[in-house]
Structures are given as structure tokens and as C-alpha cells.
Image (cartoon, coloured by chain):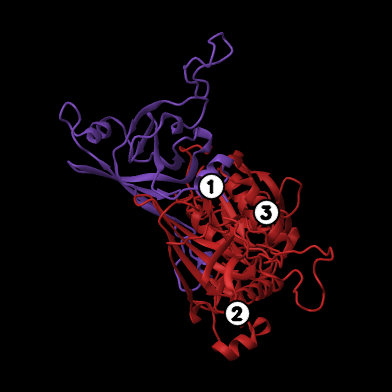
Chain colours: A red, B purple
Amino acid sequence: MADPTTDRLSDPFQIGRASRYANPEFEDQSLPVVYGDLTTPSRRNTGVYALAKIDTADGGVYCVAAHEVWGAVALFDDDGRIAPENYTLELSRNYQGRGAIAAAAFSAPPKGRVTAVCKGRKNESGALIENPAEVVYDLMTSVWGFSEQDIDMQSLSRATTSAKALGYRASGIILDDHAPADVLTSLLGDFLGRYEIDPFGRLKIHIAGEEPFAISPQKVLPRFGHSRIESEMARDTVINQVPVLYASDYLGARYIKHDDGSATQNTSSQRLYGVRRPPRSPLRLEWVRRESVAATVQARIVKRYHEPTRMLTIEDGSLRALEVEPDDYVAFSVPWMRSKELEPLVNQIGEVIEVNYDLGEQSMELKIRDTGFFLTSSCLLDGSKTLEGGWLLGAERDAATYA
Amino acid sequence: MRRATHQAVADIAGHEGKTAFVLYHLSTAGGKRVFCGKPAPDALIGQGGRIHFLDGSRLLDGSLLLGDGAEVLLGLHDWVEDGGRFSLGAFQGPSILEAYREKELSGLTTTINNAPDAEGHPRMSRILATEPLVGGRVDVRVGFSGQNLSDVLSIGSFTIRRIIERIDSVTIECEGN
């Protein structure tokens, strides 16, 4: 059980600032928290973020990151890349007894603003933290001050696996005071992920994985005979091209890379529905820096939304689906609706997008995305069926009533 | 899917009428109060620790540590007028993509009846005067009659942000964690 006295995700988190040190140049300068691979310079001979000068003595000491880093550090000043012999770099230094940071000490003052590229935080085994779910875990437990008890480790493990399978790698810097909830939304949102707080106050994260051809629904919903059920398919749900901006330039508050999404567009969908881009296009992927990761995100969005999504809203005047949560796959039956094959929509598989509780009326409303898949019946090849073409083995809709 | 006992799953599946008990556990530094809309069976109340009913089924021979892991229960009140509503996975349409890119933590607002107690003083006001509820935590649980504590399903957790006190009712506004 999470401790109710701990900080909450919506509370602002104060980032470390140069004022914690004895002799900084500017006390308000923030100490960056760095994740992933940020070794691509934003412009020629410029780093991607500015360093705080935490000690003005001699040539100056600059904070590369507010923590130990994996390495691959290169520093730049107004004259371009600074020769490594001009500074002493320590990837982990307990500076002035205020905790381990990555710091660069100069023998002679560099010219103008010092910027950097590097690879960020590493995990306990010394590997670079890049998996978005791993970044969430590290932020929660090492930066924001939560404990493992505040995280649903099962969902974290599933999200880690999904992200790994899809090749997701997160890279980004936190430079400002923020509410953890905002960072989680931004970080997970870039990878089609999201989070919830479970009833025990624990963080539960989800990264939408590939939708396999064999989905196992976690529950068969009861038949909502007297419930209000409606289905909505809107052209606005179609996305067949995803322009993106990625690789954030923290110095110029802009993005270095742009892709118009033409490589991952779905032309069939565009012929039917026109070019449909996401709301607030182009998508700004703050935590993506690799072209391959951006392309994966674009492709997955198009794959998921290139057809109008059938969204079902089920208002049930009872609590018969009480244990259902967002992101669950469930089997549902609305026999008066029809599938593409004009079969009654029985044992259809949907993904729960939203659950609304009315505790006063003791009723629930479910918003379910129709995946297009359904429970199939299996038959024994025991001689009872003739294979003369009358059966779709493995593809017959299971019309049995389970709940 | 929430973790639920077989009994809870069976009760949920068979639930047709409005027989569920929605319990609001208010936890503050002073202890815990449980609010509900109608009198709830004792077996559904509690959170940690084990409950032993002294009904002859237990021998007080030293094998039990009564109250082990128990919490301070300050009161059980069936004063809830409006249990409120909340959402999980809330997103702003029209595109489902917004479910991933825009996050809204759902809140919960409940209304508690503030009728006079035996001494003629509004009963909820008496509690508010001595217990700081703001900043406390509200856990929403649902149970069914005939169940025991382990079958009660937790469905939401909130933090109390604002209390509005009126002579006839008290409104408790909570935000998602």
C-alpha cells in the first residue's frame, strides 16, 4: 500500500539548481536530468543543452548532468567543440558533498556558453537507460523520490517487454520544475503509452503493443440486454499519415528533425478518407531522437487508425463489469449490431479505452474500441466434419454464450 | 483487469440490482472513517489486519494477536447522499490517439449529509472541526452483502482537495493522485 503522505504525481517537482553549490555563476540555473542517447549535436559545433556553471573558481566547473552519466560526453563553446584536454571530465563526482553529478572542470575559462552532448543515466548494471518503461521506473525511484511500492511492477514489466519488442528508445532531458504527471504523459504518450493510478495508489503504466492475431480477452462481458449501447464511427478517428517533429533542441526550444510521414502513410486509406493527420499535427515527439524510432511510432499509429474506429459506448445500470479497467481486452456481445461479414456481433473483442463510474446511481459506462477480432470456435478433426469447403477452420465466430 | 477473488467475480457477474455497497474510506492523520450510502455489514469494513469475531469460533488461548495490523477506525457513517462519479482512461476526443497524448486525472466529488446529531449539532461539521480532512485520502471500494473483507474490490484512490461545508450537506472534492 502506497503511503498517502508521500508526494503525488500531480505535485510539482523542484529540479536541482546551481544554488545548492557554494560559488555558482547563476543560482537559478537548473541541473539537467539526462536520459538516453543525446550524442547528435543540434547544429554544427553545438551541443543540445546548456550547462550550469556551478563553480566560478579558476576556469570554472560545469554540471554536465545532475547525476552520474553513461558517457560519450562532448562539450562545445562559442568556438565549437572544446578539445578534451582543456577540461577534466568526471562522469561521477560527489561535488561539494552534494551528491554524485557529472562535472567538467576547466583550467581556463571556455568562450561563452558551454553546451554538451552525452549519453544519460545508466541502470544498476551499468547499461544506458533507454527503454521508456525503464526511464519511468528510474524517474520514479531515483529522481522523484517514490519507492518501488508506488509502482505496479507487473504492468511495468509488461510495458518494458512491449517497448523492447517495438525497438522503442527514449532520449530526453528534464530541465525545468514539473509535475511528474506531465512528464509521464509526455514520455509515455510519445510511444502510444499511458498511465493510471491504481486503487492502491500505485503507478500503472501501459505501452500499447502490437495487436496480435490471437488476442486473449481477459473477460467476457455480460450481455447488456437493457443497457444503452451505441456505436460511433467517425472520420475524425482516421489517421493515415503522421508528420512528426522529433529530436528536441533544448537550446533553441525547437526540433531538429522533421518527417512528413509519407514513408509510412496508408494510400488506400487516403483514397477513401482523404489525407487524415493527427489533431495538432505535426506530432511533437519530445522523447524521440532516432529516425527509426520515429518511423516506428508513425507506422504504428497509421496501422492502428487507418480505418474509422468503431467505438462502442455501453451504459449499464449496474456494476456488472466492475473489475474491468482501461487497456483490458474484453469480449462483448451486441447481437443487433453486425460485423463486416454481417454476422451478429457476438463475442467480439474490444479494447477498453475508458471506464466511467457513477457511484450515486451505481452504474458504469464503458468506451470500447472494436478491434475487429472475435472469439473463434474450434472443432475437433475427429471425423465429425467433412472438409468439403463448408467450414472456415479456426475462423468461425464462436456464438456460444459465456456470460 | 482488477485482481478480485472468485467470490467477488461471481458477485459482480450476478449483480443485477442496486445491492452493492460503495464504501468511501477517508484516511487522515487521525485515522480512518468509512462513509457509505446505506448501513454496510461489518464484514466489508476494514483494510489491513485480520478481523476476528468473538462469536465462539476462536479460543483466546494466546494463539491470536488481536488487533494485529489493524487500523484506527474512527467511525462508520451511512451519510453519503451523492457518491459522485469518476473516470479511468479519460480522453478528449475525437481521436483515440488523444488518449495517449493528453492525460486528465479524474477527480471525484461526493456529498455527505450534515443532518443534526443527537445533540442538535450538524454531525459532519463536528467531525470537520476536529479532523483535518484536506490532504487526506479517499479510497473507493465496492462490496456485496454476504462477502467478507477480502472480496471487497478497490476501484479508485483520490486525495481530498477541498471541503465545502453547508448546514445540510458537506461536499468533498477530491483529485486523482
Judging from the image, mark 2 belongs to the subunit labelled A
Q: Assess disc 3: are there few (<14), some (14-19) or many (≥20) residues with their C-alpha within 10 Å of its C-alpha.
A: some
Q: Is residue B46 above or below residue A120?
A: above
Say which residue appears at 27% left-offset and 29% top-offset: B130
Q: Find numbered disc 3 in the image and state the secondary structure of the residue it sits on.
A: helix
Q: Find numbered disc 1 in the image and state the secondary structure of the residue it sits on.
A: loop
Judging from the image, mark 3 belongs to the subunit labelled A
The label number, if any, that marks residue A23 in the structure image: 1
Pointer 1 or 2: first along the chain: 1
Cα distance in 3D space between marks 1 and 2: 56 Å
Image quadrant assignment for residue A146: top right
Q: Amino acid at mark 3?
A: Arg
Q: Which residue is mark 2?
A: A306
Tell me residue B161's x, y (percent). 35, 46
Q: Is residue A297 visible?
A: yes
Image quadrant assignment for residue A214: bottom right
Q: Amino acid at mark 2?
A: His
The label number, if any, that marks residue A183 in the structure image: none
Q: Is residue A355 above or below residue B115?
A: below
Tell me residue A284's x, y (percent). 55, 72
Q: Assess disc 2: are there few (<14), some (14-19) or many (≥20) residues with their C-alpha within 10 Å of its C-alpha.
A: many
Q: Amino acid at mark 1?
A: Asn
Q: Assess disc 1: are there few (<14), some (14-19) or many (≥20) residues with their C-alpha within 10 Å of its C-alpha.
A: some
Say which residue appears at 65% left-offset and 72% top-offset: A300
Cα distance in 3D space between marks 1 and 3: 46 Å
Q: Which residue is mark 3?
A: A158
Residue placed most toward the observer, A271 or B42: B42
Pointer 2 or 3: first along the chain: 3
Tell me residue A302's x, y (percent). 62, 77
